[in-house]
């Protein structure tokens, strides 16, 4: 019979092996180690994939999780919810990402990245709506000038928020793992 300490030690070694397999590009080994049944190991696999820039693979694994668990973040899925929100943001799905960021900020009020993520989503939505307004309604020049002023202000605010570093920053090594031709816009 194994002791609880031994089980935790073995789990820690398994997590380390998953992380090492992903970092060395042995995704197949990492997936075998994570298995299919354990949410904790699946979570570790997804986090490792995302951390190493395998965004598309991380997204595939996230889609295996019940959507409610990602949209209404609770432990042990908080980190996965953050990853899902970033992926949604990068895919310009701001309506899905914003409430996840807000829920994460509610769970942990000191988590500034979640608040900045939500603010970025709302600014992106405002920019999109204003640009759409110009395209659809062709307002008079005076109205367009006002809208352009708002757009400039929103873009400046968005640049300030982006400068906070709330979103995962990707190194050149991580970027190599991105899909060759992706519909996502990654930062």
Image: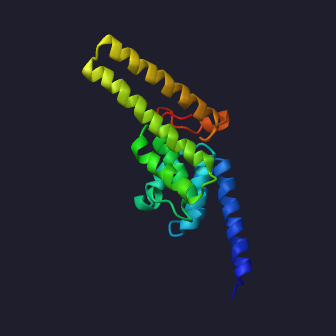
Quadrant of the drawing holding the N terminus: bottom right
- From this view, report whether residue 11 is shown above or below residue 71: below
- On the rendered structure, is 98 left or right of 167? left
Q: x, y (%) of residue 183?
A: 43, 34
Residue nearest the viewer, comparing 2 with 125: 125
Residue 77 image-quadrant placement: bottom right
**Name of the residue lying farthest toward the top:** 141
- From this view, report whether residue 10 is shown above or below residue 24: below
Residue 125 image-quadrant placement: top left
Question: In the image, what residue occupies the spot 46% across and 62% down?
Answer: 69
**Name of the residue lying farthest toward the left:** 137
- From this view, report whether residue 150 is shown above or below residue 33: above
Q: x, y (%) of residue 36?
A: 50, 66
- On the rendered structure, is 72 left or right of 117? left
Q: x, y (%) of residue 88?
A: 46, 44
Question: In the image, what residue occupies the spot 34% across and 17% down?
Answer: 143
Residue nearest the viewer, comparing 114 with 63: 114
- On the rendered structure, is 78 left or right of 21? left
State the count of labels.
0
Q: x, y (%) of residue 187?
A: 57, 34
Residue nearest the viewer, comparing 108 with 143: 143
Residue 184 visible in rendering: no
Question: In the image, what residue occupies the spot 49% across and 48% down?
Answer: 85
């Amino acid at each position: 019979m194994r002791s609880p300490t031994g089980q935790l030690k073995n789990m820690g070694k398994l997590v380390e092996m998953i992380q090492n397999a992903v970092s060395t590009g042995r995704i197949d080994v990492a997936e075998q180690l994570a298995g299919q049944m354990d949410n904790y190991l699946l979570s570790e696999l997804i986090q490792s994939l995302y951390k190493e820039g395998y965004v598309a693979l991380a997204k595939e694994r996230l889609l295996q999780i019940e959507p409610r668990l990602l949209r209404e973040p609770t432990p042990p899925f908080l980190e996965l919810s953050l990853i899902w929100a970033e992926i949604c943001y990068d895919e310009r799905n701001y309506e899905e990402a914003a409430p996840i960021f807000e829920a994460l900020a509610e769970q942990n009020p000191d988590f500034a990245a979640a608040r900045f993520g939500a603010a970025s989503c709302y600014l992106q939505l405002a920019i999109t709506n204003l640009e759409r307004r110009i395209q659809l309604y062709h307002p008079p020049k005076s109205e367009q000038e006002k809208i352009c002023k708002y757009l400039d202000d929103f873009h400046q605010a968005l640049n300030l928020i982006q400068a906070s570093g709330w979103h995962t920053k990707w190194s050149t090594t991580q970027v190599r793992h991105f899909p060759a031709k992706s519909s996502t816009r990654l930062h």
